[in-house]
Image (cartoon, grey):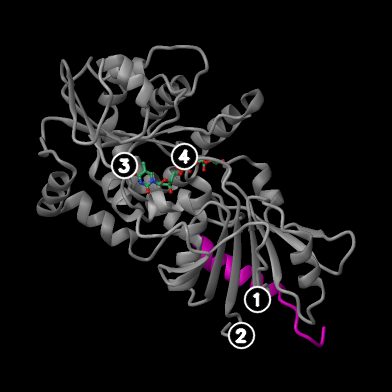
Amino acid sequence: MNFFRSAVIFCQVIDNYGDAGVCWRLARQLAQQEKLQVTLWIDNVQALQRLRPHLDPTLAMQECDGFTLCRWDEHSVPNVEVDMVIEAFGCRLPSATITAMAAMQTPPVWINLEYLSAEKWVEQSHGLPSPHPQYALTKYFYFPGFSQATGGLLKESFVDSNRSVMNNDAHHRRAFAQRLGFMLDPQSTLVSLFCYPAAPVHALLDALQTGTPVTCLIPEGVAVDQLTAYFSTTPKVGMQLQRGVLTCLITPFLEPDDFDRLLALCDVNFVRGEDSLVRAQWAAKPLVWQAYPQAEAVHLDKLQSFLDCYLSDCDAHAAQIMQQFARAWNAEQSTELDWSSLQAQLPHLQLHALQWCGHLSFQTELAQGLVRFAAERKQTPSQ
Ligand code: TRH
């Protein structure tokens, strides 16, 4: 497959960090693991700079983790003389770019990388072609997912060994906790909290005081208004906020590989959107997911599909407790969160998280699958 050498990714950041995070991760993986020459065009370098602080948003072009990063604006003239063009999350290519692709003797394979979902229709839609109405070009839909009938999940080759260190190596666990500004306490359940502003954070903080001691790590910038109201102080990095058996610690927003370490360190991870959900599954720890809120509550269908898929082989009682807790965490009306019951099920949920992570690892990795998929569809000039 060595004739397949180059890829361009286009990314439009809607909000938050997920779009930038997934595209950065895919670009890095295609460059470092699949050995492609990769260019990522992104319309909001600042969003990516939150994840990779060394980046300079004033530059039109710069190197980043083995690929070329370009600022994408109305003046950009991207070179699409490559083997594969990836349009992330239906971000719509400029018409000049499509015309340029159509004019090539061998146009690139054109992929629309879609959002992650566990809904059943994804398996039927993955890989479908969409012929362009005007040009001899075909766009293919590529869906990430949780079964072999989908495009799989991004997973770097170092994920398993990094996780294993953070799960098991006492020295590294202690050192990483110290870097984050706290001492590990084996008596305290370690929780990480990454959520949207609409999450019932007050109900969670109340609930976390109802069992044995809990240390809750909250990245800077997350749930700021709710924490300010709850603790009557504005949260800042390094702060420890105490209520009963609960200690909340405000941690820095971490670079992605350190965020993975944090997830692997904790006993339970509250994650949101799509990319942190994937990372929490590779961390092999129990997770509570908040779906990205969408109009007409369609995200609740996504949530239910994920829970049914994720928990299908879990101990039935633990699965039921997790289902209830996750639905309450995503509920639009204020609600009670039964933390004590969830905490009691953590041994079952922990075992399940490890088995689930192993099960997912048998799927074809997304970047590898994508290159294979595109190479199979690449025309040769004689065709
Ligand atoms: O930031 P998000 O809410 O992104 C969302 C979703 O992707 C959603 O589907 C999309 O439509 C919307 O944006 C526009 O959540 P997500 O997907 O988990 O992305 C967060 C990224 O930030 C992820 O790559 C993990 C990373 N991260 C760090 O690297 N360090 C950190 O400290 C934290 C908290 C997150």
* Residue 210 location (% of width, % of height): 23, 14
Task: Give the residues drawn in magenta, as a range.
Answer: 363-383
Marks 2 and 3, the one that precedes in the sequence = 2
Q: Nearer the viewer, mark 2 or mark 3?
A: 2
Q: Mark on residue 285?
A: 3
- Residue 376 inside the magenta-drawn segment: yes
Position of residue 148 relative to residue 205, above or below, is: below
Q: Nearer the viewer, mark 4 or mark 3?
A: 3
Residue 338 in sight: no
Marks 4 and 3, the one that precedes in the sequence = 3
Q: Amino acid at mark 3?
A: Lys
Label 2: which secondary element: loop
Q: Amino acid at mark 4?
A: Tyr
Q: Spatial distance from mark 1 to mark 2, Cα to Cα?
A: 9 Å
Residue 66 in sight: yes
User: In the rendered image, which residue does mark 2 sit on?
Assistant: 3
Ligand 1 within 8 Å of the CB at mark 3: no
Q: Mark on residue 368?
A: none
User: In the rendered image, which residue does mark 4 sit on?
Assistant: 310
Marks 1 and 4, the one that precedes in the sequence = 1
Label 4: which secondary element: helix
Label 2: few (<14), some (14–19) or many (≥20) C-alpha neighbours in 10 Å: few
Q: How many marks?
A: 4
**Residue contact between numbered discs 1 and 4, judged by CB atoms under 8 Å:** no
